Image: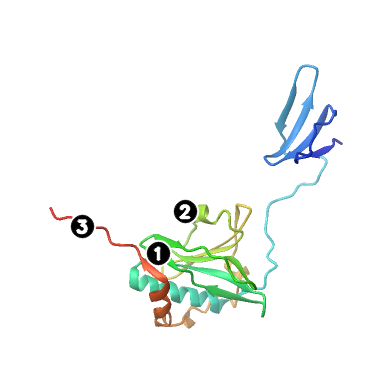
Amino acid sequence: MLAIYLKDQHFNPPDDPIYYLLARDGLFLVKRTQFFEAAVPAGGIPWLKSQEPGVRLTAPPIPAVLLLQAVSFFKAVFKRYHSEAVALLAWREAPRAYELVIPHQTVGGGHCDYEVREFPAGLVRLGTIHSHAGLEAFHSERDEADERHEDGFHLTVGNLDGDLTMSCSVVVQGYRGQIPPEHLFSPYPIPWAKLPPEADWDEEVAAKVTPLPRPIEFGT
């Protein structure tokens, strides 16, 4: 077996002719001969057992009623501005329950930007739920770029004007994994017939959702 060293601020290269070095950039095999000294990427350590990437959910199921509230909000925004919208998924430490937070956001068509603010003590941000307006639910390149540095659940709801579609994922350290919605929500299937009225969100939409300014049209 070869020694494994950590390249931290106190690291001094040892005299070993061959060893593993774990650095910020990954695992390397360092080798010295009378002709060269090299550090090359190492795909793994052969005498250790393999490990597949994966996520095991330990959180309690998200109440389906919370998703229904989010979709009702998305529909209210879609009806008024025909655009995407976003809600934040949070966890209230006491009484240990999920919560929906609507941030201030600017929307227009396939565009949705929202304010990132610190949550108060006792409220933990767990991820996002956002709509794709009239398009099918999926995680776009922009979604992946926006979410890559935010560990947590990231859910997309699409086809707001028809049969709803949904895509659920979890992001950890920039890696994304898909989650079957039946593993995330309770009860499942989602009781879509119990969707709250869109009008319940009229005040929230007026207070927190700002449409992008219309482009200026010049006459010919």
Residue 17 vertical position relative to residue 144 in the rendered view, above or below: above
The residue mark sitting in front, 1 or 2, is: 1
Gap in Å between the C-alphas at discs 1 and 3?
A: 21 Å
Say whether marks 3 and 2 touch (CB < 8 Å): no
Kind of element beneath mark 3: loop
**Mark sitting on residue 98:** none
The residue positioned farthest toward the left in the image shown: 220
Q: Within 10 angstroms of label 3, few (less than 14), some, or many (20 or more) residues?
A: few
Q: Earlier in the sequence, mark 1 or mark 2?
A: 1
- Does residue 174 appear to the left or right of 198 in the view shown? right
118 horizontally vs 75: left or right: right
The residue that mark 3 highlights is 217
Q: Amino acid at mark 1?
A: Thr
- Tell me if mark 1 has few (under 14), some (14-19) or many (20+) residues whose alpha carbon lies within 10 angstroms of its own: many
Q: Residue at x 47, y 53 (%)?
A: 142
Residue 31 horizontal side relative to residue 204, left or right: right
Q: Earlier in the sequence, mark 1 or mark 3?
A: 1
Q: What's under tag 2, amino acid-wise?
A: Arg
Labels 3 and 2: the sequence-earlier one: 2
Q: Position of residue 178 (x, y in %)?
A: 59, 59
Which residue is denoted by mark 2 in the rendering? 142
Q: Amino acid at mark 3?
A: Glu
Which quarter of the image is occupied by the N terminus? Answer: top right
Determine the residue located farthest toward the top in the rendered image.
35
Could you say which quadrant of the image residue 134 lies in?
Answer: bottom left
Q: Secondary structure at mark 2?
A: helix
Q: Residue at x 82, y 29 (%)?
A: 18
Labels 1 & 3 near each other (Cβ < 8 A): no
Q: Name the foreground residue: 29 vs 64.
A: 29
Residue 48 in picture, x, y percent from top left? 81, 44
At a point 47% along the width and 80% down the height, the residue shown is 195
